Image: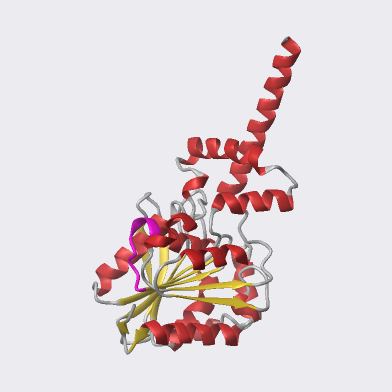
Amino acid sequence: MRKALRALLISFLFTFSLGFYFTNRLMYFKKKDEQFIVQREKEAGRFNPEQFDSLPKREVTIESPFGYPIKALLVEPHVSNRYVIISHGVTETKINSIKYMNLFLENGFNAVIYDHRRHGESGGKTTSFGHYEKFDLKAVIDWLKKEKGSTLTLGIHGESMGAATMLLYAGMLEDGADFYIADCPFSDLKEQLSYQLKKEYKMIPSLLIPIADFILRLREKYSIRHVSPISVIENIRNPILFIHSENDDFILPAMTKELYEKKQGPKMLYLAVNGRHAQSFNENPEDYRRVLDEFLKTYVVNGEFYG
C-alpha cells in the first residue's frame, strides 16, 4: 500500500513539475534579441532607418490597465482621418511592424506601432498569448480615439499572436475597428499547444495541458481555454482579411481556414504560396500588397468605411 502511495505521489509531483515548467515556457516565452530584429529587417530591406527617421512621428506612452507602460509610436505623414494599428507577434517588437505600416502609409493611412507587454520597450512581466494583450490593445485604441476623435477610420493589422490578440479584442471586448487584417493567427490556444506538444515533444497533450492550465490559473489568473479566437469570431461583424502561408508548419493554415469559415459578414481569404510561419509578406510581397489593396478598395473608399 505504501509503495503504491509513494508511486502515486512521485507521479503527481513529476506531472506537477512538468506542468510548472510548461507554464514557465509560456509565461516567459523566449524572445528574439532586439538588435537581431533590427539587423534582420535592415538586411532584408524591410526597414530603412533613414526613411523611417524622416517620417513625422512622436513617441507615446500609454498606461496599461495592469499598471505598466505601453510604448508606441504615432506616425503621421498624412493629413487624414485614416489610421491603422499594427499588433506584432510573440518574440518580435514594433520594428517588425514597420514593413506592414509602410503598406498602409502607401494607401494614405497614418499608423500606430507599439510593443506588446514584456516586449521591446513596454512593461509587463509575462506573455499571455492574447489574454492580457487584448486589454492593452484596447488601451491603445482608446488612446487613439481620444486623441484623434471618434470619427476616424480605423484598421488593425495583427501578425501571429498579434492577430489572435486582435481577434480576441474584437470578439470579446468590442468590435471597435472598422476593419481587421489577421495574418497567421491561431484559432485556439489549447489546440495550438496540443499540436506543438505532439510535434515538438512527442507528448500526450491530454495529460499535461489540464495540469498546466490549473497551474496557469493559479499563477496568472486566466485559463488556456479562454484564449480562443474561434469561440468569439462570430461576434466580429466588421470586415476581416485572413492571411496565412500554405507551408506554415508552426500555426497550421487550417486554423485560419476555420476562422474564415466561421466568420459572419464581410471577409476575404489569402493563402500565400511561399513561406512558412509569419512569412507571407516576406516571401510574397507583391501578392500581399495586391490583396491588401483589393481589400481596402472594397471596404474603405475615399476615406469612408463601407462594411
Q: Is residue 87 above or below residue 50?
A: above
Q: Is residue 37 visible?
A: yes
Quadrant housing the C terminus: bottom left
Instruction: Please name the predominant secondary structure of the magenta segment in the image.
Output: loop
Q: Residue at x 44, y 56 (%)?
A: 133
Q: Residue at x 39, y 59 (%)?
A: 171
Of residues 150 and 60, the one nearer the viewer is: 150
Q: Residue at x 55, y 73 (%)?
A: 243
Of residues 89 and 174, the one nearer the viewer is: 174
Q: Check if residue 5 falls in the magenta segment.
A: no
Q: Residue at x 48, y 41 (%)?
A: 220
Residue 129: give x, y in percent of width and height. Answer: 52, 54
Range of the magenta residues?
Answer: 171-178
Residue 204: give x, y in percent of width and height. Answer: 70, 42
Q: Is residue 136 visible?
A: no
Residue 254: give x, y in percent of width and height. Answer: 61, 64
Quadrant housing the N terminus: top right
Q: Is residue 119 above or below residue 109?
A: above
Position of 189 with respect to 172 (left or right) is: right
Position of 290 with respect to 104 (left or right) is: right
Residue 299: give x, y in percent of width and height. Answer: 38, 82
